[in-house]
Each structure stands twice: as structure tokens, then as C-alpha cells.
Image (cartoon, rainbow, N blue to C red):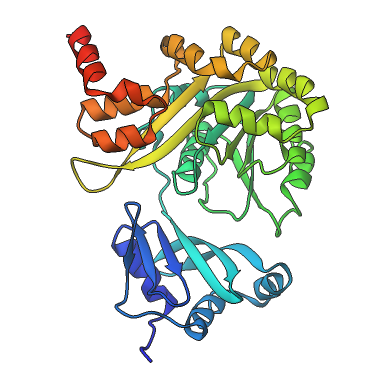
Amino acid sequence: MNQAREIRDYLHLTVEKGGSDLHLTVGAPPAARVNGVLQALEDFSLNADQIRELILGTMNETQRATLDEDWELDYAIEVRNVGRFRGNVHFCRQNIEAVYRYIPAEIPDLSSLGHYPIMEEICHLQRGLILITGVTGSGKTTTLAALVQRISELRSGTVITLEDPIEFTFQHNSSLVKQREIGRDTKSFAKGLRQCMRQDPDVIVVGELRDRESMQIAMTAAETGHLVISTLHTLDAPKSIERIMDLFPSDQQRQIASQLSNVLEAIVCQRLLPRADVDGRVLCSEALRVNSGIRACLRERKVEQLVGLMEIAHKEGCHTIDACLETLLKHGYITHHDAVQNCRDERRFSSENLAARSAVKK
């Protein structure tokens, strides 16, 4: 049997290669996700006992007890001279497996992430609901952290975060930043949200709005004069609205639509695509900045009109995923294949249409 290295060695290799995640899977080599692609870190597979020993070595007794009871565990670990990681431990075919997400020590500036200017505008908002959306691994947590850091620099107040687990750690700037972890500092997102309303918050940051109760409390908090920022696992702006509405029974949706139209300020959806010009990935985004027309559309639940309204409102900070893809393609940052794979309207990326729009711009 081949001898496995220590867990810190695999985590170090992941960081050294520029990876985002380390996967420990029974019957496969330990693997790092680098620029979206898995790379094996050994030329041999690890068995169940080896994987179990690696994972349990990162956990304390309380965390092991939680895993035994819940069969799932989210937690954070700090490895000296390597870095901080978010771990998710779970069972597959009755074997323990895990994924570890690397959390850089330095929180990047918003300007370095590739976002449009709308993100800086969002940082100046005093109240309302902001949603950062995307699939797993699309950089939502990094964007959220960069937003919190920028807001804490710009305004004097209290920023309260609810996270599961705490990932990036913040320094106090002009604002106090109070980070609370689910399972250690509060029992749940919903309970933490309720209690933080009594803690004099100016900005409330929720790692993820996962259920109806949390969504309702978040909208109420935004309605009562707080800036609330959170994430959703959705692909684009229209699907984000649909996801919110689907959290509630049909007899409540008219009321929720009205409330959402009053509190929603922006939705920023993001994806990370492989770069065509150099190694790495590039950010592709869609931004909905709510104006009077979009508020009316939300109130009347005409989600199918959102894309058209976003295209019209590009001077107000809106842009669609297709507009962003076209810009990235024009600059040679992505391939035509990736543009077509990620677009909303394939016809927009036909050779004839691309050539026609290029001629018009000239």
C-alpha cells in the first residue's frame, strides 16, 4: 500500500499550484482544482482508512461529535505556514470524504476582481438588499469579502456577518466588523438574523440565504433601514428572482413580490470562465441595478421582462451576461465556444451577428 502524505502537505501543494480546492475521495488520488480543472497530487489512489485518518486529524472532539450526529460538517481550519481553509466533510457510500477550499490571507480589492463599476456604487448604498449569486466555485465568497472590506473603509458603523463557517477574517476599519459563526456563535442563520437586529447593525452580511425564514427576515431588515448583503446559488438575475419567489407558498407570493420590489437594490451574478489568452480564469458577470421600471416589473411578477429592462438600463449600471460575454470575446479573453456555452441567446454569438455588431460600432 502506498503511503499517504500528511494533510498539510496536500493543502500546501494545492496552494502552491494555485488551486482553489483539495478533494479527498476514497479510491482516487488526492486532487486539487486548478483554474477549474482537477489535477491529481499523487500517482496512486487513497483507501478509506487513509482518507479517514487525514480528515479526522484536522478535527477536534466537538467537530467529530457533530459529524457523527449530523453526517455532515462545515468548518474552518488554519494550517501554519500554509493558510486558512473551509472544509466540508461528508459521507459517500458510508466512507468519510472531504473538500477543502483555500481562503487567501489577503482580501482582494474589488477593482482587482474584474467587476464593473456598479460594485463600487453598491458600497455607497445605505439600505436595501444586495444579492451576489452564482454556482459553487464562482467566487461569490471572495466578492462578498471584498464588498465588506470596502464598505468598512467607506463608512462608520457596525457590520455584522453571519457565516457558516467564518472564512475571510476582517480588521476593524472605519466600521466595526463583528463576525459570527453558525454553530459556534449562534444556532442558525434565522436565529442569528433575528438577534443581530438588536445589536445596532448598519450592515448585515449573511453567508447564504438558504430558506424561507432567513429570506423573510433579511427582507424585513432591509425594509427597516439596514443594508443587507447575501448570496444565492443561482445562475442569473431572473432565476434569482424566481428562486426567491419559490421559497414562499403561492398565496404569499404577491405580498413577497411587493416587498421585494421595495427592498431589492441590486443582483450581481458571476461565473469564472477559463481564459483563452493566458492561464487562469476571468470573471463574467450580470448586474441588475433596480430602477423604477424594474421595481414595477418585480411588483407585477413579470420576470420574463427583466432581461429587456436590463439591456435598456445599461447606463444605470445594468448589464446582461451576454453583453459581458461579448466584451470578453471581443478582447480575446475567452473562446467563442465558451461564450456560446454560457450565453442566454446563442443567436447573438453567430458569426453573422458578431460581424454585424462589430461593423456598426466601427
Q: Please name the residue shown 83% across and 26% down the image.
A: 251
Frontmost residue, 25 versus 176? 25
Q: Measured from the top left, where is residue 328 in percent x and y?
A: 27, 29
Residue 76 lies in quadrant: bottom right
Q: Is residue 324 visible?
A: yes
Frontmost residue, 103 versus 291? 291
Q: Please name the residue shown 52% across and 51% down the image.
A: 169
Most extreme residue toward the right, as rendered? 251
Q: Measured from the top left, where is residue 78 in percent x and y?
A: 49, 66
Quadrant of the image for the C terminus? Answer: top left
**Labels in figure, total:** 0
Q: Please name the residue shown 53% across and 71% down the image.
A: 97
Task: Give the vertical position of 52 relative to 304 (above or below).
Answer: below
Task: Give the vertical position of 331 relative to 307 (above or below).
Answer: below
- Determine whether, in the image, residue 268 is placed left or right of residue 358: right
Most extreme residue toward the bottom, as rendered? 1
Q: Measured from the top left, where is residue 134 in percent x and y?
A: 49, 39
- Determine whether, in the image, residue 55 is placed left or right of residue 82: right
Q: Measured from the top left, where is residue 69 in percent x and y?
A: 74, 71
Quadrant of the image for the N terminus? Answer: bottom left
Q: Is residue 224 visible?
A: no
Frontmost residue, 325 versus 225? 325
Residue 31 lies in quadrant: bottom left
